[in-house]
Amino acid sequence: MEHLIAGFANVLMPATLIWIVIGVSLGYMLGAMPGLGKATGVAVAIPLTFYLEPVAAISMLIGIAKGSTAGSAVSAILLNTPGEPSSAPTALDGYPLARQGKAQKALKMGLFASVIGDFLSTLLLIALAAPLARYALLIGPVELCAILFFSLTFIGGLAGGSMIKGLIAGALGVFFATVGLELETFIPRMTFGILELDDGISLVPMAIGMLAVAEMAVQAGRMRELDSAAATIVDGAHPDDRRVTWAEWLRCLPAIGRGTAIGSAVGILPGLGASVGSFLSYGVARKLSKTPEAFGTGMIEGVAASESADNAVVPSSFVPLFALGIPGSVIAAILIAALIMHGLTPGPRMFAEQPQMVANIYAAMLCASVVMLAIGLLGQKLFAQVIRVPLRLVIPIVLFLCCVGAYMDSGSIFSIYVMLFFAVLGYFSRKLGFSFVTFLIGFVIGPNLKLTFRQSLQILNHDPMRLIGHPVAVVFLVLTVVVVVAIAFSNSRVAVREELAARAAPSNPRKLEEESR
């Protein structure tokens, strides 16, 4: 506690606080632009911090990471174009709310959920880093493979109306993740002689193509209809359209609590990432809702669930980084370079050798959460004006930003070709009812899934009976089977009920009751 108090004294110095504000502001702007997320912002900013004091430098980088995670919800809500793949669930309900004249309400709930999830996850990091590090050592390749398989199956069952289509989409995502050089033999797989594919398909242009460009293509086909609707859409005249009411807070608090818990757990487990956390939280909120069919039409709980989990992943991903020296996310991996450059080596000895520096980082993370709330509230009215721009002007701007974001990922025009390919795939997935959400999750966890599966085969010596020695993996495999059966049973009941309703509607309602019995 003494170290943490001293950490606040160091961080609240004007020079350090200014760099936190600069970092959060830059991150917020970068997050709102498709393709320019926290990973890009932090990676570019690391060389710029070389001449800063260690506390100020790391505080600025943490501010960029946190600000960009919250800022990615802005374009998701206002333009249906997530700044990062992990904000895709936010767009599912945030954009319909914006089209209903409730853009400020959606932005405020997204901001509040982001800050709450981020702040609580930081407190968990401070309180549980050392104890959880002991249990994190129990997560080996076999356990991680079972966890990834469970995540893919669970999200595949919840993301769309059909579990079969969801699982097919997830399997296709894993399939595209296999493109590139094979790790052990260095044999190219499905590269077709294209050198740019040797390193695999990049997530950024793929996500931009499937989420943003495909959505713009769909909206372009309905431009007249949507433009006429946009002409009638303004900020809601009723004050409740521009604020979060107490009734909505009561509905959203459970979703925020679950989202924070899910995001924190996902961040602690290396390899899952923010996308898994936000999609998983959104799926749970939808499944537990009394009106799951309303999700995707403007349910504010969907925004709260997604954003709280998305932002909770960032602080909790530092748990394995600080305690074990293992990055729990992409941003944690990038921050290793900055920490080492400023004299802090992540690992178990860090707490004993440099406790004050660790406390300074904790204090900077908590201050960044507060600064993020202030910047989000100050800039919200400006961001909300985007909804007033006609769609015929929005689509070219969004497409331009998509091309810029895809190009900046690799500095090659090939990334734009990748974006266009997956834009076509995303367009037809929407038309045919396949879950592009599950596809992206399958692609995100695909590399870790195939690596841990291969490692598991070697550890178990191809003998499934040896799973008995890995109880954590057994639990998740059993949960996978239970989830598949439960979702299949639930979907079959809904299908039967709809079929009976369709057959009995024109005739006798008593006949419907007898058949349903």
Image (cartoon, rainbow, N blue to C red):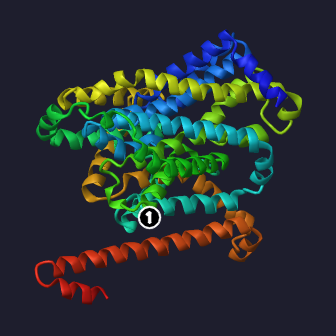
Q: Is residue 203 above or below residue 45?
A: below
62 vs 401, left or right, is right
Can you give x and y, in whole percent of width and height, for residue 451 in the image? Answer: 62, 54
Residue assigned mark 1: 157
Q: Is residue 29 above or below residue 276?
A: above
Can you give x and y, in whole percent of width and height, for residue 507 in the image? Answer: 11, 83
Instruction: Say whether residue 181 is visible.
Output: no
Q: Is residue 165 above or below residue 508?
A: above
Please identify the quadrant where the C terminus is shown: bottom left
Q: Badge 1: few (under 14), some or many (20 or more) residues near its Cα, within 10 Å?
A: many
Q: Report the amino acid beneath label 1.
A: Gly
Residue at figure coordinates x 58%, y 58% from the top left: 148
Quarter location, residue 245: top left
173 vs 337, left or right, is left
Q: Nearer the viewer, residue 173 or 458?
A: 173
396 vs 443, left or right, is left
Can you give x and y, in whole percent of width and height, for residue 332 in the image? Answer: 65, 35
473 vs 213, left or right, is right
Instruction: Say whether residue 255 is visible.
Output: yes
Residue at figure coordinates x 57%, y 46% from the top left: 260
Q: Nearer the viewer, residue 138 or 279?
A: 279
Please identify the quadrant where the N terminus is shown: top right
Helix, strand or loop status at disc 1: helix
Number of marks in the rendered image: 1
Can you give x and y, in whole percent of width and height, for residue 252 in the image? Answer: 46, 48
Q: Is residue 253 above or below residue 40?
A: below
Residue at figure coordinates x 19%, y 28% from the top left: 390
